[in-house]
Structures are given as C-alpha cells and as structure tokens.
Image: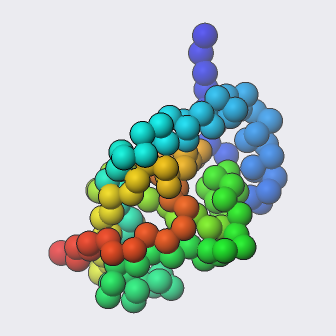
Amino acid sequence: MQFSLRVLKVQNPTKTYVAYQKRNFLIPLLHNFQNFLARNSKTKHKLFRGFQPSHPNFPKALKKGHVRPRALFLGHSDPYKHNYGDTSWSNLTSWSLDKSLAELHAGEDGIVLEAEVPSFRCKWSPDVYYENEVLVKGCVVGTPYSALI
C-alpha cells in the first residue's frame, strides 16, 4: 500500500484546510500521536524557536525568553488551522525539534530560543512545511536563548 502526501499551495487557508481534510484519510489516526506524547507526563521535549527582529514578540524573547501565543485565552487550539495560517486567533506557538531550522528562521540578526517542554503541553502538527514542527499550547516562560553569530 502506498501513501502520497500532497503539499497544497496556501492561498486561502480555509479552503486548503478543508481540501487537506478530504484528501487525507489518515487524519484521525494522526491525532493519536498527541496521546502518544502525553502518555508519560514526565517526559520533556527539547524544542527550538527562531525569532527575527521584525517579529512583534522579539523584545520579550530577547530580554526574558518569553514566548506568548497571539490569542492566549480566547484563541483556538486547532493544529490544522494554525498550520495553514490562522495564527492570529491561535493559543498555540510553533516550535521545531531541529535547531538548524530554528536558526534558519531566525536569520542573521535573530535569536533562537531553546526550551524543554513537558509532553502533555505538546500537540501534534500537520507539518505541511516539513519543519519537524511541534505546537505548544500556552506560554513558554524562562527559556534560555542564544544569539546567532
């Protein structure tokens, strides 16, 4: 049995999201990945996030290492909507398991935050851009940061 995954061009996030749901019959099975991460709440994942100086939360990330979602209390926590561009009303933040990808997103003048996040706060991501993405619900506070050279 062969499976193919199509990367859809994101022009209209809502239409793309619906098209992705219709084409991918594995979606219900992939939701179980979140349960797999949450089995052992003592497990922590080392995650990385790159910030460019143009990012609105760059000063907080640089000073204190704080990462806050755009819609902390009233936002949605739907990984598909978040991954397809609806981040303005999301209570999730995007992180990567790969430090080099975070460095790529940070650019020359940016910073990379590193955090150890408990598995029960991590959500599975559709990861349509192949970034080894993990979504974290809520704020991540006190993460050490490293400036890129």
Q: Nearer the viewer, residue 138 or 63?
A: 138
**x then y, percent, for residue 57:** 47, 83
**x then y, percent, for residue 100:** 29, 56
Q: Nearer the viewer, residue 36 or 129?
A: 36
- In the rendered structure, the answer to whether residue 90 lies left or right of residue 52 reads right
- In the rendered structure, the answer to whether residue 61 lies left or right of residue 139 reads left
Quick one: quadrant of the N terminus? top right
Position of 147 relative to 37 (above/below): below
Decide if residue 42 is in sight here.
yes
Position of 82 relative to 8 (above/below): below
Position of 12 relative to 144 (above/below): above
Q: Nearer the viewer, residue 19 or 72?
A: 72
Decide if residue 84 is in sight here.
no
Q: Nearer the viewer, residue 46 or 128?
A: 46
Q: Residue at 47% across / 37% down in the picture?
A: 39
**x then y, percent, for residue 55:** 47, 81
Q: Residue at 72% across / 73% down in the picture?
A: 74
**x then y, percent, for residue 114:** 30, 64
Coloured how? Answer: rainbow
Position of 37 relative to 84 (above/below): above
